[in-house]
Image (tube, helix red, strand yellow):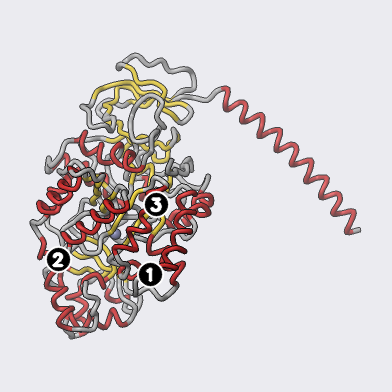
Amino acid sequence: MIRVKTTMKCALFLKRLVYSFLILSLLSVAAFARQSATHFRDVTVVDGTGSPRYVADVTILGGRIVRIGKPGTMKPRQGDRVIEGSGLVLAPGFIDIHNHSESGLLREGTAANQVSQGITTLIVGPDGGSPDVIGDYLNGLQGKVAVNVGAFIGHGTLRTLVMKEDLRRPATAEEIAQMSVLLEKAMKDGAFGLSSGLEYDAGFSATTEELIQLARVAAKHGGIYMTHMRDEEEGVLDAIREAIRIGREAKIAVQVSHIKMGNKSVWGKSAEAIALINEARESGLDITADAYPYIAWASTITVLVPSRRHEDPAEVQKGIDALGGADKVLITSCRAFPVYEGKTLEQAAALEKKTPVDTYIEIVKNGGAGVVGFGMNESDVRAFYQTPWVMVSSDGGIGGRHPRGTGTFPRVLGLFVRENEWLGLEEAIRKMSMFPAQRLGLRDRGRIKKGMRADLVLFDPETVVDRATFTEPQLFAEGIKGIFVNGVEVWDGTKITGQLPGEIVKRR
Ligand SMILES: [Zn+2]
């Protein structure tokens, strides 16, 4: 009886399978036959190269830009979509070279807060922290994401895989050899290079020699070395010198992550940092940087005390003073003391009737906290944004607690370009598209040109602006009218469409 039932079920199932297959095949043939184009009529093209804008009709079809013609010359066919672009800017989709959506993308492939700001390609694995196995991670996202995704392999991740918990010491020759094997595998899987996070526990104890040896492995496969440097505060210039040395000795291109003057003690030194890097560039080193458009960083509370003597009151006081005071530290997450979340370190201390120093020590003893430090100064941010070799990156990600995770790119367009007039629109777009594409070696993205992939952002240059704040970091930007990834619309001007056309991008 049971067997008969099973056989019947099987037959029925097979029949259904054959029918579904036939129907699907017919549907896809039909779809191919009447694949419709999308036309942008009379749109202002800012093509990503930095060249002056021009008005044109642009047609995309089958995931690529197929035609750019004079306004009024397009010939839509029946079934095509025509988007009126008059007064709007069409730019290449934004490429975010420093993004923390590793785990977020697994939960939320539609990536609403990434997509909504115009990001069409994001690169995960920065700051030394990446998925353990790049190939498995990327394959797992295939067909499940709205944006194109690529990855760096993290130095901290390699250390943790090889050295386990025992990270607070330089790696041995044997351990470096083991890390090199894993790194080599990641590079073969398409990683764009090696990322480091030398201010974090997993990377802090690495010697420059360890980094040079590993960077050589990445260089052998055409990768770059991308670094959250050892110090972004008092020791920032020495940290830049270390990055330059790694680049020279490993013969590898260097990307300085989120370049900044991280606290008051180094305000105004952006000129020296820029000069140092200019000098290295003139000597032949391929070194570039990226920056997010905010005067506050987000990290773990322990970065406040670079000496790592977290229980030494004098050291903690020094760290708090260097930032400019306990009111400059906003606690965004704190598992041990959730009541502190949303309060400054000064407010948390007042709550406990303790000093900020004692409160800091107590927090670190109990597992630490995520904080935002209002440590930068606007004129340094401006100086970096006005430097041609600095591109835009968000350092954000899905669900992040810093507004940069939702606001970065529209903020540059609305605040830095339109309101502050720090840089022109064409240059800002270049820093968001062609420049990061070049840095990563992505040849068919990052420009509006016939034959390029149709990753596009349509926005109103008069209204585009970020809305995300430190209290409401997830608010979507305004003025972004449409976003296309590989020719498929993922943002319709007010909401995500739910489409998942993102592809995996790899170093080639
Ligand atoms: Zn970082």
Dot 2 surroundings within 10 Å: few (below 14), some, or many (20 or more)?
some
Q: Name which of mark 2 and mark 3 comes first in the sequence.
A: 3
Kind of residue at disc 3: Ala
Q: CA distance from mark 2 to mark 1?
A: 26 Å
Ligand 1: image quarter? bottom left
**Foreground of the two, 252 or 493:** 252
Q: Name which of mark 2 and mark 1 comes first in the sequence.
A: 1
**Foreground of the two, 55 or 424:** 424
Q: Return the residue at label 3.
A: 218
Dot 1 surroundings within 10 Å: few (below 14), some, or many (20 or more)?
many
| Element type where label 2 sits in the image | loop
Residue 63 in view in this figure: yes
Q: Return the residue at label 2.
A: 234
Kind of residue at disc 1: Ala
Kind of residue at disc 2: Glu
Looking at the image, which residue is at 34% across and 35% down?
446
Left-right relation of 372 to 178? left
| Element type where label 1 sits in the image | loop
Decide: is 217 above or below 12.
Answer: below
**Label 1 with label 3: CB-CB less than 8 Å:** no
Percent of width and height locating residue 175: 43, 68
- Kindly identify which numbered label has been placed on residue 171: 1
Q: Name which of mark 1 and mark 3 comes first in the sequence.
A: 1
